[in-house]
Image: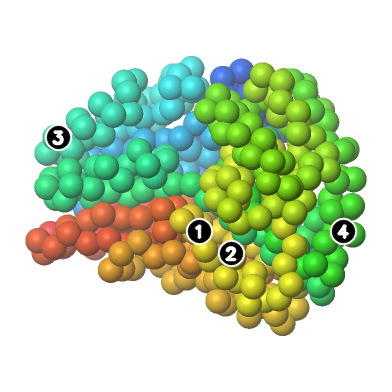
Amino acid sequence: MSFSQRLDQIVSLAEVIGKNREAIVDLAVKELRFTVKDSRTEVDLVQENLRRFQETEGLLAARAPLGGTGSSVSLMLSYNGSAWLNTTITSIFLVGNRVRVKFSSKGRKLMELTESMYRPIFGDAITFYGGSGRSFIEASLEDPEVSTVVVFGFDENILPYAEAFRSSGKKLVFEGPGSDPFIVFPDADLELALSDLMAGKFMYSGQTCTAPKRIFIHESLYDAFLELFVERVKRLRVGAPEDERTDVAPVVSDLAVHRIREQLDEAVRKGARILVGGRINGNLIQPTVLRDATDEMLGMREEVFGPVAFTSPFGSMDEVLVRAKNHKYALRAAVFGGEEARQAADSLRGGDYCHPVADYTFGTFGTVACNEARSTTWRGSFVTKPVGGYGYSGWIWETVEGEFRLKQGPKLLSVETSQPLGKG
């Protein structure tokens, strides 16, 4: 099958997804507790992204599967998404791979619906796996037809597999957590910064790896900024995900709720103050803003996967850069302000594309936005825009000419699961 034929299939999928829009939204609400608002937006965005693959012909048409004709890629997906997952599946298929897909156990019916949409278009070129994550990875390591395993998940679950991938010679592409710094300098456009913070922090009820997690505000405007921020947070509507008016719904993961409870309790014991929210009822976490968080607090050291904002003042560019870089996760950073903000962004920014590194690289970020809204920097991600980070936010293990190596930085799954035609 040619590149153009595969592209036609993906465009057909975009149409089918549009026809199934409300069914996808309904399952995202019921199984994943995502709000109707977020789920509808996601379906619309994925249709746009699937059609955007038409822009990749110059980049991808002359590529072939990394493992040769007929080889497969195993793709394990996280629960914090419904429609966008189609972008990752089709990006791997577009370059000629067969794809084996494992959805999160939290989205079984969503997987069944997705499979019913795919089968008439892709046949057995894209199949779906209903077992556990561990069995999926282990079976992929043993299967000679699998060239690459792509995992969206938690770094602590994947790091123990390093020796297994080294021994097998297979490639791993990992996309993991973030604890993204959000930095506001004194001369920032406060309306832009506040709007972006609200959108990024509370969409999907805070359950995204690229949500702002460590919010650094210059001390000269810290109190004023928090006053405006809290005022907007209080206007968020909290409730059932199926209510079309709801902005923040219950969090999906019991583990995430447990961790947030610990993070809040510890922060208050150590001197942080809750300005709004702080209440947890079952899995419903009230939108929360804390002030005076310090870097040793759990909420600043760990990923906060829910609608909770840890904020902290800073005094100088040098100080905030040291603090922003001092973390094991390095996925995305957002900076707002004038010349100092631009200098800070340059200091935080990593390479344009993933590259070999001697060891896990901390303090460098895969995506850095400077005075740009999240909606702008996210456009085309996984299609034309490479995505990924440094540290334990994402990496690649691969064996090249008998040498096992590590790569970090932004990446396209289509490129990393393929090779130039005629090679290999």
Question: Which residue type does callout 3 highlight?
Answer: Asp
Question: Which residue type does callout 1 highlight?
Answer: His
| Local crowd size for mark 1, using a 10 Å CA cut-off: few (<14), some (14–19), many (≥20) | many
Residue drawn 60% across the image and 29% down it: 257
- Residue 229: which disc? none
Residue 142 relative to residue 357: left or right? left
Q: Is residue 411 above or below residue 210?
A: below
Query: Residue 124: image x %, image y %?
Result: 28, 28
- Measured in 3D between alpha carbons, the distance from the residue under mark 2 to the one under mark 4, in whole angstroms, is 20 Å
Q: Which of the 4 quarters of the picture holds residue 146?
A: top left
- Measured in 3D between alpha carbons, the distance from the residue under mark 1 to the one under mark 3, in whole angstroms, is 36 Å
In what element is the residue under mark 3? loop
Question: Which residue type does callout 4 highlight?
Answer: Asp
| Local crowd size for mark 3, using a 10 Å CA cut-off: few (<14), some (14–19), many (≥20) | few
- Measured in 3D between alpha carbons, the distance from the residue under mark 4 to the one under mark 1, in whole angstroms, is 26 Å
Query: Residue 317: image x %, image y %?
Result: 67, 76
Query: Residue 140: image x %, image y %?
Result: 21, 35
Q: Is residue 20 visible?
A: no
Judging by the rendered image, the residue that carries numbered circle 1 is 327
- Residue 143: which disc? 3
Q: Which of the 4 quarters of the picture holds residue 208?
A: top right
In what element is the residue under mark 2? helix
| Local crowd size for mark 4, using a 10 Å CA cut-off: few (<14), some (14–19), many (≥20) | some
- Measured in 3D between alpha carbons, the distance from the residue under mark 1 to the one under mark 2, in whole angstroms, is 7 Å
Judging by the rendered image, the residue that carries numbered circle 2 is 324
Query: Residue 323: image x %, image y %?
Result: 59, 65
Earlier sequence position, callout 1 versus callout 3: 3
| Local crowd size for mark 2, using a 10 Å CA cut-off: few (<14), some (14–19), many (≥20) | many
Q: Is residue 279 visible?
A: yes
Quarter of the image with the N terminus is: top left
